[in-house]
């Protein structure tokens, strides 16, 4: 079994956080998800509307139709 004490954890956490939350990594995530550059036609068709009745059953499901 491995053990990491609090001080070691904080050091490793700060290193990992600075890599994961870098500007280039965040921008890359938005680009990969087609959220940047902003193009609603790439994102909105992927959204789905689900209407659920009181018993938890789906009444219908359909793609979101943007008001563009």
Image: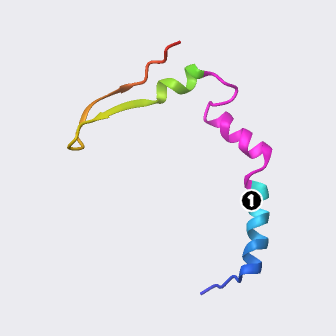
Q: Which residues are drawn in magenta?
A: 20-39
Side of 55 where 67 appears, left or right:
right
The answer to which image quadrant residue 50 occupies is top left
Residue name at image x 41 percent, y 30 percent:
48
Residue name at image x 72 percent, y 43 percent:
26
At which x and y percent is residue 52? 28, 37
Side of 24 where 46 appears, left or right:
left
Mark 1 lies on residue? 17
Is 29 a magenta residue? Answer: yes
Q: Secondary structure at mark 1?
A: helix
The answer to which image quadrant residue 37 occupies is top right
Q: Name the residue at the left extreme.
A: 55
Side of 8 where 58 appears, left or right:
left
Q: Is residue 45 above or below residue 12?
A: above
Side of 18 where 37 appears, left or right:
left
> Viewer-proximal residue, 23 or 57?
57
Callout 1: 10 Å neighbours few (<14), some, many (20+)?
Answer: few
Residue name at image x 48 percent, y 29 percent:
46
Q: Is residue 18 above or below residue 35?
A: below
> Viewer-proximal residue, 68 or 42?
68
At which x and y percent is residue 3? 66, 85
The answer to which image quadrant residue 33 occupies is top right
At which x and y percent is residue 67? 49, 14
Residue name at image x 22 percent, y 41 percent:
54
Q: Quadrant of the N terminus?
A: bottom right
Q: Name the residue at the top extreme.
A: 68
Is 58 a magenta residue? Answer: no
């Amino acid at each position: 079994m491995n053990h990491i004490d609090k001080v070691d954890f904080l050091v490793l956490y700060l290193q990992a956080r600075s890599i994961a939350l870098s500007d280039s990594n965040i921008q890359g995530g938005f680009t990969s998800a087609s959220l940047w550059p902003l193009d609603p036609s790439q994102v909105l068709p992927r959204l789905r509307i689900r209407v659920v009745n009181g018993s938890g059953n789906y009444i219908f499901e359909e793609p979101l139709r943007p008001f563009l």
